[in-house]
Amino acid sequence: MESFKAKTLTPILLVLVLLPCVICSSSQQHIKEDMLNNHHQVVEPISHRLSLQIVIHGFLLWASMGFLIPVGILAIRLSNREENERRLRIMFCIHAVTQILSVILVTAGAILSVKNFSNTFDNMHRRIGVALYGLVLLQALTGLLRPARGGKGRSLWFFSHWALGTTISLLGIMSVYTGLHAYQKKTSRNIKPWVMFYTAEIVCIGFLYLLQEKWEYIQKQEVIPGNESTIVELSDNRETLSSSQNKDSC
């Protein structure tokens, strides 16, 4: 399952690196078309209150989709090869807490949008937002209904949970970029620094994701095949010696 996920997400991550360029070029094309078609119209300035609400909405969605969800994904992936029970619990708690906070922030952003913004769903950002919110709630429900490891239906649940999480991550990235474009169109403000910042963040997260997959393989490059048992024994002896020294110091 892990190799399947790695093979599947590697091309997806490559697409995500190129996605900002495509969206930026598309945004520039839309802006040029709007200027040609509506050059006689003057964009009405929005109020300070509405501008602040848009910024808060964007921050809530970025904190959820662009920070908490990726941190939760990276944390749960670290637990795949972890054998220490205490560390496993810590990583699972980090995953659970970040995803719960993400749902709360997404809900707050959705409420803010419904209450203060237009709900005509006449652009891509609003349509993606509706689909994204529904999938986030569904993902939270599947997390609560998680069967015990080794139980019946665990494999199907795991695949569904992973597929939903991947879809949410992709839609979340698209939502942030389309939201930035909508903000630029609404306020005529420069979004290039934010696009560059978010793109750099995506590249870093993708790099860490792939590094997690290959880290164990990288470590084994200094081990001669057939000597793995010796390395394990030496590691166990070091841990035993360290624990005995700690007891003596106490």
Image (cartoon, grey):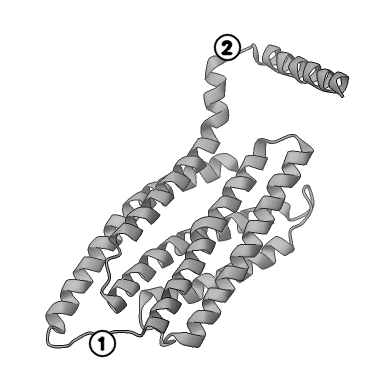
Residue 177, position as x, y percentages in the image: 37, 64
Q: Earlier in the sequence, mark 2 or mark 1?
A: 1
Residue 58, position as x, y percentages in the image: 44, 70
Q: Amino acid at mark 2?
A: Ile
- Under tag 2, what secondary structure? loop
| Lateral position of residue 87 relative to residue 44, left or right | right
Q: Quadrant of the N terminus?
A: top right
Determine the image quadrant of residue 69.
Answer: bottom right
Q: Quadrant of the C terminus?
A: top right
| Lateral position of residue 209 relative to residue 18, left or right | right
Q: How many marks?
A: 2
- Under tag 1, what secondary structure? loop
At horizontal 45% and vertical 41% (from top left) the residue drawn is 207
**Residue under pointer 1:** 44
In this view of the protein, which residue sits in the foreground, 18 or 185? 185
| Lateral position of residue 195 relative to residue 5, left or right | left
At horizontal 55% and vertical 39% (from top left) the residue drawn is 3
Q: Amino acid at mark 1?
A: Glu
| Lateral position of residue 229 relative to residue 34, left or right | right
In this view of the protein, which residue sits in the foreground, 22 or 237? 237
**Residue under pointer 2:** 224
Rate crowding at label 1 as few (under 14), some (14 to 19) or many (20 or more) other CA atoms within 10 Å: few
